[in-house]
Image (spheres, helix red, strand yellow):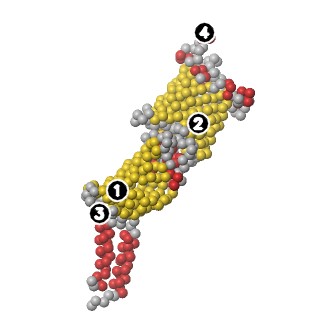
Amino acid sequence: MNTITKYDRLLTAVGTLLLFLIHGVSFAQLERKLATEDRKTDLVFHAPRHINLLTVEALDKSTLHFAIMHTFGPVNGGFRNLYGLDNGANIQFSFEYALKDKFSLGVSRSGRDKFYNLYGRYHLLEQTESETMPFSLSLMAAAGVNTSDYAYLQENAPDFAQRSSFAAQVMLARKITKKLSFQLSPLLAYFNSPLPAYSIEGDQQLYLALGFSGNYKVTAMSSLTLQWIPNLNNGLRNNVGVGIDVEAGGHVFQMYFVTSPALNEQYLLAGGNGVPGEEFRLGFNVNRIFATGGN
Amino acid sequence: MSWKRLWLLPVVYLLLVEEALAQEYKTETGEVVFLSSASLNEFTGESGKLNGLLDLASKTFDFYIDLNTLETGIGLRDRHMRENYLETNKYPFAEFSGKLEKSGPLKLNQAVMVKAVGTFKIHGQEKDRIISGKLTKISASEVLLEADFQVKLGDFDIAIPQLMFYELSEIQQVTIKAALKNE
């Protein structure tokens, strides 16, 4: 009996087809998996500074951040004073070095009152792409000294303690969309002796304020920037700044209009501000990060 | 052969397939290095997370890498690379899969030339590529794949601005080295 039934043929055909379906089209293929699901969010801000305030942007271990910041005279002096550029600038240099990925120490020197500031930043939380951490949180503390010459005050000249002032801030930031980042910075400044001879407008010791920083990316390399620092416990005018950040040739350039010539936290809070719009000053920061390769 | 024994055909096929499965070589730790040599700046980036599958029976392959794992030694440069150029949030992988042609049988410690014909994908763009490499059987269950090729960033819509953060070359020289294991 060598005949084959229809049934036999059908069985063979179906069986072969099934196997081809299962194995026949098995083109080598791997499942795509991310190496790290919980990656940190990149570049919440362009640089560790944003107009005048520090940001949550951390430095990698053993890298050095150098910033040179300027604010000029009020632009309402008009063309005659080249919109404030003739008035000379308040200039601050700062060097900040990362001892660890999360901790850096910095020193800055501002021209106004020949002020030296020592500061540290610690990055407690960092926003992640997977939203397991929805925001970044950093802390900053500073101690500074005014080294201006007050010999003309004779026996009333302030001593070191009287020249000292302190600042602290919490930086809470979130990259809301690919283009929009926002930072909220509760700030505190304390002057041991807020003498009238200092280049500040306030006469109290303790200053509290709330900083708002906004960044809107226009292109991959440039952003519109905003800063608003309302005072919480005094009648001084609030600080307002608007500007642009541009990354080019290894630097982050920050150009802005701001109401205060102050460049460090203590003077930003106690220094007083011009009327926004009328007494804007031109400001200009250059940020550069150097990798020292000491990993 | 009796027609009745036709049912044996699928069984034979199944055995062949099983044999074929035994020809699959895999890795998750292949090395990738890219070299960017621009006139003013030369740097390399590396990752040890190349995932690969090589099927010597069906002569097919599939490789991919999570681009977030590339490191150039400068954290800020890596962040700019991910954020502004490779856009890894949108396009996390570089992929290459297709057919493999071997110039001869594999013998222990003797390299044979291989030609990979397939689709290379990065930054959401696909391009057909032929990449030559070297395949060496390094143990009973391991083969070593080595290849060099170039990736032209413009082909994949990866923009290079005139004023770059770190001077970047239009042509990236890529080297891969992966030991794939048969399990």
The residue lying at 27 percent from left, 83 percent from top is B1
The residue wearing badge 3 is: B105
- In the image, which disc is placed on residue B134? 1
Q: Is residue A103 visible?
A: no
Q: Find residue B130 and report its horizontal and vertical position in percent.
A: 43, 60
**What type is the residue that disc 2 sits on?**
Phe
The reply to whether the C-beta atoms of the residues labelled 3 and 4 are less than 8 Å apart is no
Label 2 vs label 1: CA separation?
47 Å
User: Depth check: A155 or B76 in front?
Assistant: B76
The reply to whether label 2 and label 1 mark residues of one chain is no
- In the image, which disc is placed on residue A253? 2
The reply to whether label 2 and label 3 mark residues of one chain is no
Q: Find residue B38 and report its horizontal and vertical position in percent.
A: 49, 44
Q: Is residue B167 left or right of residue A152?
A: left
The reply to whether the C-beta atoms of the residues labelled 1 and 4 are less than 8 Å apart is no
The reply to whether the C-beta atoms of the residues labelled 2 and 1 are less than 8 Å apart is no
**What type is the residue that disc 1 sits on?**
Lys
Query: What is the quadrant of the N terminus of chain A in the image?
Result: bottom left
User: Depth check: A38 or B87 in front?
Assistant: B87
Q: Chain of mark 4?
A: A
The residue wearing badge 4 is: A154
